[in-house]
Image (tube, rainbow, N blue to C red):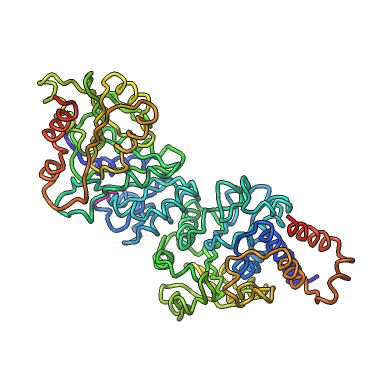
Amino acid sequence: MTHTARLEAIARDCRVQIIRMLAHAGSGHPGGSLSVIDLVVTLLFERMRHDPARPAAPERDRLILSKGHAVPAVYAAMARAGYFAEDRLITLRKLGSPLQGHPDRTALPGIEAATGSLGQGLSVAVGLALGLRLAGSSARVYCILGDGEIQEGQVWEAAMSAPRLGQPRHPLDNLTVILDYNKIQLDDFVAKILDLEPLVAKWKAFGWPVLEIDGHKIDQIDAALEQARATRGTPTFVVAHTVKGKGVSFMEHNPEWHGKAPKPAEAIAAIREILGVPEAGWERHLASDPRARALVDELRGLEKR
Amino acid sequence: MPAKATRAAFGEALLELGARDERIVALDADLSKSTMTVGFAKKFPDRAFNLGIAEQNAIGVAAGLALAGRIPFVCSFACFIVGRFETIRMSVAYTNANVKIVGTHAGIAIGEDGYSQMGLEDVACVRALPNVPVVQPADEAETRQAVAWAAGHEGPVYLRLTRQAMEAVSPPDYRFELGRWPLLRSGHDVTLVASGGPLFNCLRAAEQLAAEGIHADVLNASSIKPLDEDGLLRSAGRTGHVVTVEDHTVAGGLGGAVAELLSEVLPTPLKRLGVQGFGESGDPAGLYARHGLDAGGIAASVRKFLKR
């Protein structure tokens, strides 16, 4: 298996787990979780230095998911990486679970900040990057923003400050910010609610080098993150063009699926699509794939409840 | 000790602490000359960050710095910094980031600038957060102690400071402790619980009242969250009457906190003195007189409350 194929396979597994956990929760945000997962997987399984056994290790790289509603994507990747057992994913949003509906730093080791009240994560990431620089650490900070999220004014306060903060002795070139540009927010298409364009020109005008990539192409994501890592003297902004609901045909490009959990039958249909199995061959596939079989049985069990 | 603004004492204390602990950093939003961190910034330019007139970002950056092991003091006027409440709520409180939020220019005592610059609802807001102690030191000595305490306390803190000079009221050997109120004067007829700006007026009111035969306990409620529950209940149980005095809206601040405790644990007749409605421009002494927070006003309210 090639390097890229390995990450794609992990992302596919994570997509399945996202659908599964949201079906169990009965609420949550599939669209933005599916659009961001390739970014999250490339970070956790390729770029970031981190150790699931030592989630508080000072030298770890940090991920701040500012668009906190997409945290099922991070939970799925964390479980896969070994932060906790995969079967805990289905406790998402349940009473007493550390897998809160939005990230809670105090509940789950490995979550770096409370986010989900949109517009706040970039400021925290900027402060983290500055603090690590002041401490002489070589750790890197990654921040993922949502597109609708950057309508918040605080994002632009942070955008204005980051390229200048710490200069000249402690420039924040340890900070990479990635925009999950899936073009849809809760109420409707971003362009219809409050258009962000010209987006690249705005960030450039605020002093950031800007890279544009397809946020579902692992090699493009990895190359952009490598370029950001090699850049000196300034943080880097990556515009990742993505598809909301990526991987599930009836969720893709559809604002309906911003914040609605799939019902068990919908979840099974979604998982079939993610696994790339045509409808006609599904039963035959399940006979030869015990994991998928168990998952489908589990989801059908939900229907009966 | 001569009278000194608690913001000035804070600036000096931060400078001293900064020399001993390189983890301490200061963040401002274009008011460093007013919050008095300017001395710290001069001495430690690499550890002072002026984020411009962008308080939300300053609070978030402070949270990030705290998560990287620094001890940030993020400073602005109380109304501006706590006005960005949602950022404090998420990025500092819920994240449990070790951030010291410093709100200066508390209350109507800032005077001429008027309501837009007056921190009048900040205590009520921050007090609602589960994990953020609220501390309002009374004078220079207590401010120095409270700043040192805040720097050493692991977790968020809100420090409320005054623009105006504050008379020295703390005993010479006083040590600040969270949740402990120094008893500044002893009496048996009424408990006066005062915090910040009007505390000295409260002591003068107690003197006037003593001359008339009304003897008051005067407690310095520098720790607004948590309250000194034992100290308050002990005094209230003895006097049977409690008056709270604060330069803050009368809703939800120190008076509100005291009302919550007494009504649940030891129902006691209570009078809350504070700011009614919005503030306004004017000279500080005139404003205190208008809102009944001068010595005469406090004494009159106590007499009326005790029906004497």
Q: Is residue B37 magenta?
A: yes
The one of A17 and A260 positioned closer to us in this rendering: A260
Farthest residue toward the front? A304
The one of B96 and B140 positioned closer to us in this rendering: B96
Q: Is residue A2 above or below residue A58?
A: below
Residue A194 in picture, x, y percent from top left = 44, 76
- Count the numbered circles shown: 0
Residue A203 in picture, x, y percent from top left = 45, 74
Determine the residue positioned at 72% across, 57% down: A80
Quadrant (top left/top right/bottom left/bottom right) for the C terminus of chain A: bottom right
Residue B165 horizontal side relative to residue A286, left or right: left
Determine the residue positioned at 65% across, 56% down: A25
Q: Is residue A114 magenta?
A: no
Q: Is residue B253 above or below residue B32?
A: above
Where does the magenta region start and end?
A: B34-38
Evaluate whether residue B140 shows in this view. no
The one of B108 and A254 positioned closer to us in this rendering: A254
Residue A185 horizontal side relative to residue B149, left or right: right
Determine the residue positioned at 75% across, 73% down: A273
Main secondary structure found in the magenta portion:
helix
Residue B237 in picture, x, y percent from top left = 31, 20
The one of A304 and A230 positioned closer to us in this rendering: A304
Q: Is residue B100 above or below residue B168?
A: below
Determine the residue positioned at 52% across, 63% down: A175
Residue B126 horizontal side relative to residue A301, left or right: left
Evaluate whether residue A253 shows in this view. yes
